[in-house]
Image (spheres, helix red, strand yellow):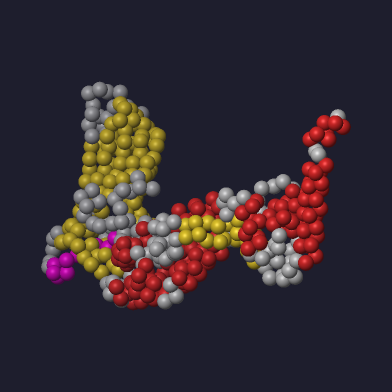
C-alpha cells in the first residue's frame, strides 16, 4: 500500500497540493483582514446560467472581493453545497467571504423579471405571479391595483383629455370619473400601453402595489413629460369603448323581469273548469319604464285609444321618446291599459290523451304601475310608489318595484275543461312585440311546469324557471 501511494503521489505532487492549500488559505486570510470597510449596500445580480467562475469574476469586477482564489476556497471549504439561485442579492464590500456565501445560500432579495411588449395587465400579472410565487388573490387583483394606481396618477389629465376628445359636458365627465374601477378591464384599459417592456428588478417579497409602483416609476422615468406621454401612448380603441360605456351609463334604461306564475289553482265556474294564476313582473333596470300618452290627444273627449310614447331618461335629466303602443279603455278593470304588454301560454308537455294537443295563448293588456316593492335597495328605487294611477296620461314601473295581476282577476285564466290529465307548461312573456326598449329581453319569460288533474280539481307545481338570471 505504501508503495502504491508513493507511485500515485510523488513528493513533488504532494508539495504542490500543500502549497496550493496554503496559498488559498493565505489569500483567504489576507482578504479577510484587508477587505474593504465600506458598508454601502449594493445589489449583486446573478443571471440564469451563471457559473461559479462567472459569479467570481462579477464579484471581483464590482469590488466585492479582491481575489477569486479566496472565493473558490471559501465556497468549497465553508459552502453548504447549495446552488446559487438567479436573482439579486444585497451585498457590501465589508462582508467576509463566508457572509457572501451564506447570503447566496438564502433566497435572493430580488428577481429579474422580463415583461414583453403589447400584453394585457392580466398577462403581466401572471408573469409576476409565476416569478414571485404570488397567491391566487394577488394574481387576480394585480390588474385592479395597477390600473387604480395609474388612474390615481393621471386622472386629472384624463378628465381633460376625455372631455375634450368626446365633447362631454359636466354630467358625462362626472360619470366617467365615477366609473374608474372599470378601466383595468382589457376592453376599457386605455392605460394598457403605459409601461416599458424590458427586465425589472423586483423585490421578491414585493406586494402587488409595490410591483405596480415599480412599473409606473420606470415609465415616468423614461417619459417624464406626462401629458405628452399620455397623448402618445393612450389606447384609442379602449378610449372609444369607454366613451360608448359612458353613453350607456348615462341612459337610465328599464329592465323588465317576468316572475313565474304563482297561486295556480283549478276552479269550476258555471259548468266550466278554469286554470287561474297570478302573474307578476318587476323592474331591475337603472331607470323606470315610463309610458306617456300623446299630448296632442289630451283634451279630446271620450274613451278613445291614444298613442303612447316610452320616455327614456338620462342622468342629466334629459330624455328621449319612442312610439311604443296605445292606451285603451279596459272595461273589465274599469281603467286604462297598455296594449300588447304580455302573452300567457299554456301548452301540454306530457299528457294521457294522444289526441289532445291544444296550445292556448292569451294576449294581455296591462295597467303598468308600482303595486308592490321587490327591492328598495336597488339603484334608483324609491321608498314609495311613483306610478300609482291607471290613467290615460302616464303609467310606469319604477326600479325595484313590481306589478302583479292576481289569480282572482277576471282575465287571469285558461279554460281547461277538456284538458286531459298530465304535465303542462304555463308561461308569461313580457313585451312580446318589442313595444318598449329595455336593457335585455333575455329575462322576459317566466314559466312553471305543472301537473294538472282537472277531474279532481288538482294542480301541482313541478318546477319554476326564470330566464336571464
Is 355 on the left-hand or right-hand side of 442?
Answer: left
**Displayed quadrant of residue 400:** bottom left
Q: Nearer the viewer, residue 140 or 325?
A: 140
Q: Is residue 152 above or below residue 27?
A: below
Which image quadrant: the N terminus?
top right
Which residue is depicted at the point 17% across and 58% down?
326
Q: Which residue is drawn at 15% across and 61% down?
A: 306
Residue nearer the viewer, 337 or 468: 468
Q: In the image, what residue occupies the spot 44% across and 61% down?
A: 197
Q: Which residue is drawn at 21% across and 46% down?
A: 363
Q: Position of residue 164 (x, y in %)?
A: 30, 76
Q: Is residue 19 left or right of residue 430?
A: right
* x and y percentages locating residue 387 in the rendered image: 32, 64
Magenta stretch bounds: 288-299
Residue 301 versus residue 55 in the image, above or below: below
Say which of 123 and 291 sits in front.
Answer: 123
Residue 1: in magenta span: no
Amino acid at each position: 500500500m505504501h508503495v502504491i501511494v508513493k507511485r500515485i503521489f510523488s513528493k513533488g505532487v504532494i508539495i504542490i497540493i500543500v502549497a496550493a492549500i496554503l496559498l488559498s488559505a493565505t489569500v483567504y486570510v489576507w482578504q479577510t483582514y484587508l477587505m474593504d470597510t465600506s458598508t454601502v449596500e449594493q445589489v449583486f445580480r446573478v443571471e440564469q446560467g451563471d457559473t461559479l467562475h462567472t459569479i467570481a469574476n462579477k464579484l471581483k469586477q464590482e469590488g466585492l472581493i479582491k481575489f477569486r482564489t479566496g472565493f473558490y476556497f471559501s465556497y468549497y471549504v465553508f459552502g453548504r453545497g447549495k446552488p446559487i439561485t438567479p436573482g439579486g442579492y444585497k451585498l457590501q464590500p465589508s462582508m467576509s467571504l463566508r457572509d457572501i456565501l451564506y447570503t447566496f445560500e438564502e433566497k435572493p432579495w430580488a428577481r429579474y423579471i422580463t415583461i414583453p411588449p403589447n400584453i394585457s395587465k392580466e398577462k403581466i400579472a401572471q408573469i409576476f405571479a409565476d416569478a414571485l410565487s404570488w397567491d391566487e388573490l394577488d394574481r387576480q387583483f394585480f390588474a385592479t391595483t395597477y390600473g387604480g394606481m395609474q388612474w390615481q396618477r393621471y386622472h386629472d389629465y384624463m378628465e381633460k383629455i376625455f372631455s375634450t376628445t368626446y365633447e362631454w359636458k359636466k354630467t358625462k365627465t362626472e360619470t366617467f370619473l365615477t366609473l374608474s374601477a372599470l378601466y383595468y378591464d382589457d376592453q376599457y384599459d386605455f392605460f394598457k400601453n403605459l409601461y416599458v417592456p424590458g427586465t425589472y428588478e423586483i423585490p421578491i417579497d414585493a406586494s402587488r402595489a409595490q410591483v405596480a409602483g415599480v412599473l409606473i416609476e420606470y415609465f415616468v422615468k423614461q417619459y417624464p413629460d406626462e401629458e405628452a406621454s399620455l397623448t402618445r401612448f393612450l389606447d384609442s380603441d379602449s378610449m372609444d369603448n369607454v366613451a360608448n360605456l359612458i353613453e350607456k351609463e348615462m341612459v337610465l334604461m328599464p329592465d323588465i323581469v317576468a316572475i313565474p306564475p304563482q297561486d295556480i289553482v283549478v276552479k269550476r265556474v258555471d259548468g266550466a273548469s278554469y286554470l287561474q294564476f297570478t302573474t307578476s313582473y318587476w323592474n331591475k333596470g337603472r331607470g323606470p319604464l315610463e309610458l306617456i300618452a300623446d299630448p296632442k290627444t289630451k283634451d279630446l273627449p271620450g274613451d278613445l285609444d291614444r298613442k303612447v310614447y316610452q320616455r327614456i331618461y338620462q342622468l342629466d335629466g334629459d330624455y328621449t321618446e319612442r312610439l311604443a303602443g296605445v292606451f285603451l279603455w279596459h272595461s273589465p278593470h274599469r281603467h286604462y291599459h297598455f296594449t300588447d304588454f304580455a302573452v300567457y301560454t299554456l301548452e301540454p308537455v306530457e299528457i294521457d290523451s294522444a289526441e289532445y294537443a291544444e296550445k292556448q295563448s292569451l294576449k294581455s293588456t296591462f295597467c303598468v304601475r308600482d303595486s308592490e316593492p321587490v327591492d328598495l335597495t336597488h339603484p334608483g328605487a324609491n321608498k314609495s310608489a311613483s306610478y300609482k294611477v291607471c290613467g290615460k296620461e302616464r303609467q310606469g314601473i319604477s326600479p325595484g318595484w313590481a306589478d302583479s295581476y292576481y289569480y282572482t282577476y277576471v282575465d287571469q285564466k285558461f279554460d281547461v275543461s277538456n284538458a286531459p290529465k298530465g304535465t303542462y307548461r304555463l308561461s308569461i312573456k313580457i313585451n312580446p312585440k318589442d313595444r318598449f326598449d329595455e336593457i335585455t329581453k333575455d329575462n322576459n319569460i317566466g314559466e312553471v311546469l305543472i301537473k294538472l288533474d282537472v277531474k279532481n280539481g288538482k294542480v301541482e307545481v313541478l318546477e319554476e324557471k326564470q330566464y336571464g338570471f
